[in-house]
Image (spheres, grey):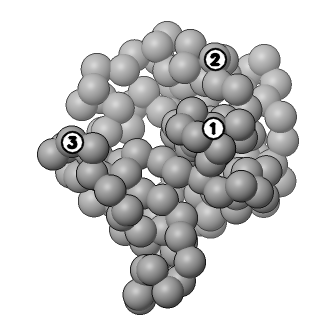
Amino acid sequence: MVLHEPTPADFSACAAWVADLPLWRRYGLTPAGAERTLRRSPRLLVAGDAEGVIAFDPAGGFGRAGYVKLVAAAAPGRGIGHALLRAAEAECAGGMLLLCADFNLRARAFYAREGWCIRARPSPSLAPVARSPASCCPR
């Protein structure tokens, strides 16, 4: 899987399918809103021909850990999310964290397969997931 910096066309192409994902439709995200979110991201990587996208901040929004805002693949199950997440982890050497809605079972299962685990819950509807040593996240 080839990952690259976004081209001008990637923003609108990714925004169109990101806004159509059930999770983001639930939040009322429009293609225009998705494109604004992607363009404002401190760091963005795109997979292939706009088949996947990860928006993250290597400097982090919480202490020194990198922060993942969005990781999505147009066609799940092809290793795109795995490649994107690994690339972001490589850039966030001080660790990373992300927030995941409790009801987003598909995402929570994906993160668990990738070795992430729930570390804290700031609210009843959010399950923040933070990378931690395998000893903290028994399989």
Q: Amino acid at mark 2?
A: Arg
Location of the N terminus by quadrant is bottom right
- The residue beneath circle 2 is 40
Q: Is residue 34 above or below residue 49?
A: above
Give how far apart the Cα atoms at labels 2 and 1 are: 14 Å
Q: Amino acid at mark 1?
A: Gly
Q: Amino acid at mark 3?
A: Ser
- The residue beneath circle 1 is 60
| Residue farthest to the left, as pictured | 124
Residue at figure coordinates x 84%, y 41% from the top left: 4
Location of the C terminus by quadrant is bottom left
Give how far apart the Cα atoms at labels 2 and 3 are: 25 Å
Q: Position of residue 32 (x, y in %)?
A: 49, 11
Q: Position of residue 31 (x, y in %)?
A: 47, 17
Residue 137 occupies which quadrant of the picture? bottom left
Q: Position of residue 24 (x, y in %)?
A: 35, 32
- The residue beneath circle 3 is 123
The answer to which of marks 1 and 3 sits earlier in the sequence is 1
> Quick one: SS at disc 3?
loop
State yes or no: discs 2 and 1 in contact (Cβ < 8 Å): no
Q: Is residue 103 above or below residue 19?
A: below
Q: Position of residue 90 (x, y in %)?
A: 78, 58
> Quick one: SS at disc 2?
helix
Residue at figure coordinates x 27%, y 59% from the top left: 105
